[in-house]
Image: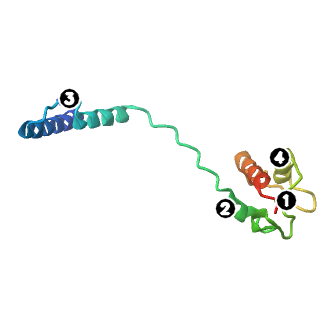
């Protein structure tokens, strides 16, 4: 019994070979038809690559979680303070987002994962102080 990949490869090699002979072009098994089939067979046998983590869309997360109090994506004060130019350290910003501030800001540690909180910290600390 012949494997289906072998039939497919045989058809491509035969067709490519016949065309090469008809046109007077030298033909070798390293032709694109053979290489393509070989690559496809290798890909089918190889394990699937690990899925990359989707990139965090910080501005979208900010709009959904923070824009109620911090206007202009943190560039202007609203109900909460302007975030651009904050004097808080990275660690302090992380703690503030995760645990909140009594009477001022709710904690988001149960709503956001660590990567999302870190993305917010990086975003906030990267805002220009205008």
- Tag 1 secondary structure: loop
Q: CA distance from mark 1 to mark 3?
A: 67 Å
Mark 4 or mark 1, which has the lower sequence index? 4
Q: Are marks 1 and 3 in contact (CB under 8 Å)?
A: no
Q: Quadrant of residue 4?
A: top left
Return the x and y of residue 27 as percentages of the image width and height.
15, 32
Foreground disc of the pair 1, 3: 3
- Tag 3 secondary structure: loop
Q: Are marks 3 and 4 in contact (CB under 8 Å)?
A: no
Return the x and y of residue 107 as percentages of the image width and height.
83, 55
| Residue hosting label 2 | 60
Q: Is residue 113 left or right of residue 16?
A: right
- Tag 2 secondary structure: helix
Q: Is residue 119 left or right of residue 86?
A: left
Query: The N terminus lies in which quarter of the figure?
Result: top left
Mark 1 or mark 3, which has the lower sequence index? 3
Foreground disc of the pair 2, 1: 2
Q: CA distance from mark 2 to mark 1?
A: 19 Å
- Residue 106: numbered disc: 1
Q: CA distance from mark 3 to mark 4?
A: 59 Å
Q: Is residue 30 left or right of residue 62?
A: left
Mark 2 or mark 1, which has the lower sequence index? 2
Foreground disc of the pair 2, 3: 3
- Residue 29: numbered disc: 3
Any part of residue 94 in sight = yes
| Residue hosting label 4 | 90
Q: Residue at x 90, y 56 (%)?
A: 101
Query: The C terminus lies in which quarter of the figure?
Result: bottom right
């Amino acid at each position: 019994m012949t494997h289906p990949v072998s039939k497919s490869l045989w058809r491509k090699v035969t067709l490519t070979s016949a065309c090469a002979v008809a046109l007077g072009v030298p033909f070798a098994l390293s032709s694109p038809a053979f290489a393509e089939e070989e690559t496809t067979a290798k890909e089918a046998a190889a394990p699937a690559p690990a899925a990359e983590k989707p990139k965090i869309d910080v501005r979208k997360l900010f709009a959904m979680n923070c824009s109620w109090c911090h206007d202009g994506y943190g560039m202007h004060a609203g109900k909460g303070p302007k975030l651009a130019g904050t004097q808080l350290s990275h660690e302090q910003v992380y703690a503030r987002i995760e645990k909140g501030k009594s009477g001022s800001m709710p904690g988001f540690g149960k709503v956001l994962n660590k990567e999302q909180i870190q993305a917010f910290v990086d975003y906030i600390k990267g805002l220009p102080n205008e």
